């Protein structure tokens, strides 16, 4: 089984579906990535801040797969923003991953109160792109306001904006702005890894009755329905699991199609309530922490 390719705005091809490894403990990362590669995944999303780039790199190196057949995405943490600091951030990530070139390097967050630093970090990504050290560059958790300010200053339009998108929080305004400017939306927490309080009951997208009904109609699971919803709407998605069975389940989504009505029903579940941190509140004081050299 192979994942459908998405062509980025600089013609680099990225597998639409990847494995995410946020909160995957370092000692479980190698096995999770190995299971994903065995299943057929060819795209892994990690980050300097996750503390498991080394194990991601080890699993890829240990698999009998050409390096060029695996798409490696990682993120520069805010503590490494600034032109020189971000160049050094790349060196740290590349060293830990054990690679010369990173396929997609993105800024993990905007720093709204120090946007100049964010722009300097992005300028370093542009240099890395021009030097061929990365194949594509992008951002994460950028809202319309941040994208607008970035586009005003940047010479390279980000290829990707990785943001929280799942049925309960869809960020259509950010998605639409990205689409208008050739910025692909990549969904983090694509199956609602973030749990919500909806109405009075404690629930998660995985227990949503609408998604459950659609899943039953297709003989699929709620996670598979949500991933299909992303793929059919043109988004990249990077579900996380440490369990081989779920890693396989999340990849078994290429043999069914949701109807327009089903897609619309899932669109209708948006609560407008964010599960993750508010991007406007990201500051070095609150979220900064050093990224180790090794
Ligand atoms: P997900 O929506 O991928 O959900 C992951 C959670 O769901 C885990 O608890 C996992 O548990 C469980 N799970 C996985 N598959 C299934 C399944 N088929 N059925 C039931 N439960 C399942 O949320 P994440 O927050 O992990 O987001 C995915 C990825 O997005 C991250 O790993 C990371 O790469 C990226 N991310 C980026 C952020 C950013 O700021 N840029 C922020 C957050 C995430 P288990 O492992 O036990 O199976």
Image (cartoon, rainbow, N blue to C red):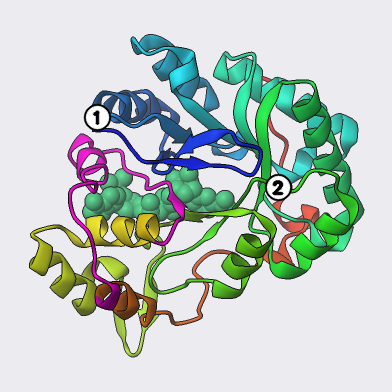
Which stretch is magenta?
Answer: 233-261
Q: Is residue 145 visible?
A: yes
Give whichever of 163, 183 is nearer the camera.
183
Which corner quadrant holds the N terminus? top left
User: Is 39 included in the stretch rendered in magenta?
Assistant: no
**Image-quadrant location for residue 199:** bottom left
Residue at 77 percent across and 58 percent down: it is: 283
Residue at 75 percent across and 48 percent down: it is: 157
Q: Is residue 76 visible?
A: no
Relative image position of residue 273 (x, y in whole percent): 50, 78
Mark 2 CB within 8 Å of ligand 1: no
Q: Main secondary structure of the magenta part?
A: loop
User: Is 259 included in the stretch rendered in magenta?
Assistant: yes
Mark 1 lies on a secondary structure that is helix
Which residue is labeled 1 in the image?
A: 39
Q: CA distance from mark 1 to mark 2?
A: 30 Å
**Image-quadrant location for residue 91:** top right
């Amino acid at each position: 089984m192979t994942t459908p390719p998405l062509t980025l705005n600089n013609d680099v091809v990225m597998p639409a579906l990847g494995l995410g490894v946020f909160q995957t403990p370092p000692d479980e990362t190698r096995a999770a990535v190995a299971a994903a590669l065995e299943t057929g995944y060819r795209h892994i999303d990690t980050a300097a801040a996750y503390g498991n780039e080394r194990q991601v790199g080890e699993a890829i190196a240990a698999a009998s797969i050409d390096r060029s057949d695996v798409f490696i995405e990682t993120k520069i943490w805010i503590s490494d923003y600034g032109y020189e600091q971000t160049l050094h951030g790349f060196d740290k990530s590349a060293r830990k991953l054990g690679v010369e070139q990173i396929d997609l390097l993105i800024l993990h967050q905007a720093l709204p109160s120090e946007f100049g630093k964010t722009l300097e970090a992005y300028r370093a990504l542009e240099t890395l792109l021009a030097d061929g050290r990365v194949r594509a560059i992008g951002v994460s958790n950028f809202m319309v306001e941040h994208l607008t300010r970035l586009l005003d200053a940047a010479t390279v339009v980000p290829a990707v904006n990785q943001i929280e998108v799942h049925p309960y929080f869809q960020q259509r305004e950010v998605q639409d702005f990205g689409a208008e400017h050739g910025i692909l939306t990549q969904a983090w927490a694509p199956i609602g890894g973030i749990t919500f309080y909806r109405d009075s009951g404690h629930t998660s997208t995985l227990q949503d009755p609408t998604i459950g009904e659609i899943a039953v109609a297709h003989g699929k699971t709620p996670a598979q329905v949500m991933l299909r919803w992303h793929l059919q709407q043109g988004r990249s998605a990077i579900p996380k699991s440490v369990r081989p069975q779920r890693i396989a389940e999340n990849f078994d989504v290429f043999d069914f199609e949701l109807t327009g009505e089903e897609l619309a029903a899932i669109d209708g579940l948006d609560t407008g309530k964010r599960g993750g941190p508010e991007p406007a509140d990201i500051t070095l004081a609150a979220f900064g922490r050093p990224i180790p050299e090794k």
